[in-house]
Image: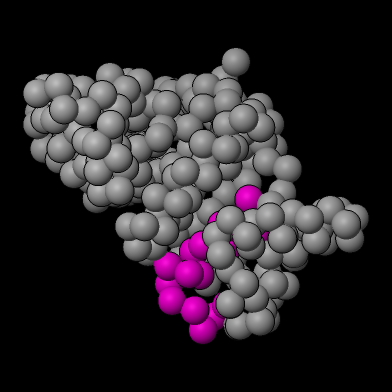
């Protein structure tokens, strides 16, 4: 089943054509990374989805994350931000505390709970806004560069968390400028005013030629992994130096 169905979507800004009969299906319970260069139409497509363009069918409840976290901060402390949407949707006090405590523990947010979200770094703001959505019962989550201001380690922690969400049958669509955000995804789509390719990520990362043909660079750790696999030094893909060391010492 497709959670998002786009059929023959055409968008023009004046004489500038963005999409011409664009069609795309996002599969249920998948993490899809949509990458592409600047002005490729990623944000335009994201906006058309959240506006529910008549050419787009959404089969489920949609939550979204904007690029600018300041537009989604609604509370005066981090703790209140994390609880805000839960309270708005009528969760019980016990559910609110349990869900908030779990997300705080995973992302180690204890030290900033009493702080004003607006006074955090931009990466921390993005994380807090994302966490305030992740505590909900999600069906479909889409993001427009929602991780772009996070540092590498924090971003990897979020991507690891997305793996946990798959067990809950949540569909994630990540419009990303950072090719590294394909790590852990099921499908990778290259968008450049059209669908250049739409492939399983495990096949994409094996195909260096696909990246070279489209002026993309394979994420650094995946590139190293592929080279080490060639020499039989590692068997699995790695996301960071610690995992690489573990693989090499097996």
Along the viewing direction, whichever of 193 and 127 lies nearer the viewer:
127
Q: Is residue 57 visible?
A: no
Give above or below for 50 relative to 26: below
Magenta residues?
117-134
Along the viewing direction, whichever of 193 and 184 lies nearer the viewer:
184
Give above or below for 134 relative to 120: above
Q: Is residue 187 magenta?
A: no
Residue 122 falls left or right of residue 243:
right
Q: What x and y, as percent, mark residue 20?
A: 33, 29
Q: Quadrant of the N terminus?
A: top right
Q: Measuring 39% from the left and 50% from the top, which residue is drawn there? A: 156
Along the viewing direction, whichever of 162 and 108 lies nearer the viewer:
108
Q: Is residue 110 visible?
A: yes
Q: Residue furthest top?
A: 1
Residue 95 falls left or right of residue 4:
right
Colour treatment of the image: one colour
Q: Quadrant of the C terminus?
A: top left
Give above or below for 140 relative to 124: above
Give above or below for 33 relative to 106: above
Along the viewing direction, whichever of 118 and 124 lies nearer the viewer:
124
Residue 158 falls left or right of residue 18:
right
Residue 70 falls left or right of residue 223:
right
The secondary structure that most of the magenta stretch takes on is helix
């Amino acid at each position: 089943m497709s959670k998002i169905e786009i059929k023959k979507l055409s968008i023009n800004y004046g004489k500038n054509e963005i999409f011409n009969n664009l069609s795309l299906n996002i599969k249920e319970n998948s993490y899809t990374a949509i990458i592409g260069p600047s002005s490729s139409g990623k944000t335009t497509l994201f906006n058309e989805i959240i506006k529910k363009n008549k050419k787009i069918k959404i089969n489920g409840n949609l939550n979204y994350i904007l690029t600018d976290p300041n537009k989604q901060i609604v509370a005066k402390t981090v703790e209140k931000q994390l609880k805000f949407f839960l309270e708005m949707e009528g969760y019980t006090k016990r559910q609110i505390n349990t869900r908030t405590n779990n997300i705080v523990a995973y992302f180690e947010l204890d030290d900033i709970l009493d702080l004003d979200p607006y006074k955090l770094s931009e990466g921390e703001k993005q994380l807090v806004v994302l966490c305030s959505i992740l505590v909900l019962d999600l069906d479909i989550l889409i993001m427009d560069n929602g991780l772009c201001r996070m540092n590498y380690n924090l971003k990897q922690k979020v991507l690891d968390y997305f793996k946990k969400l798959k067990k809950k049958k949540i569909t994630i669509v990540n419009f990303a400028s950072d090719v590294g955000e394909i790590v852990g995804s099921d499908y990778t789509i290259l968008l450049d005013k059209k669908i250049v390719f739409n492939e399983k990520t495990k096949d994409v990362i094996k195909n260096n030629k696909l990246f070279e043909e489209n002026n993309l660079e394979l994420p650094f750790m995946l590139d190293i992994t592929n080279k080490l696999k060639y020499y039989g030094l590692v068997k699995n893909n790695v996301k960071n130096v610690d995992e690489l060391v573990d693989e090499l010492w097996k």
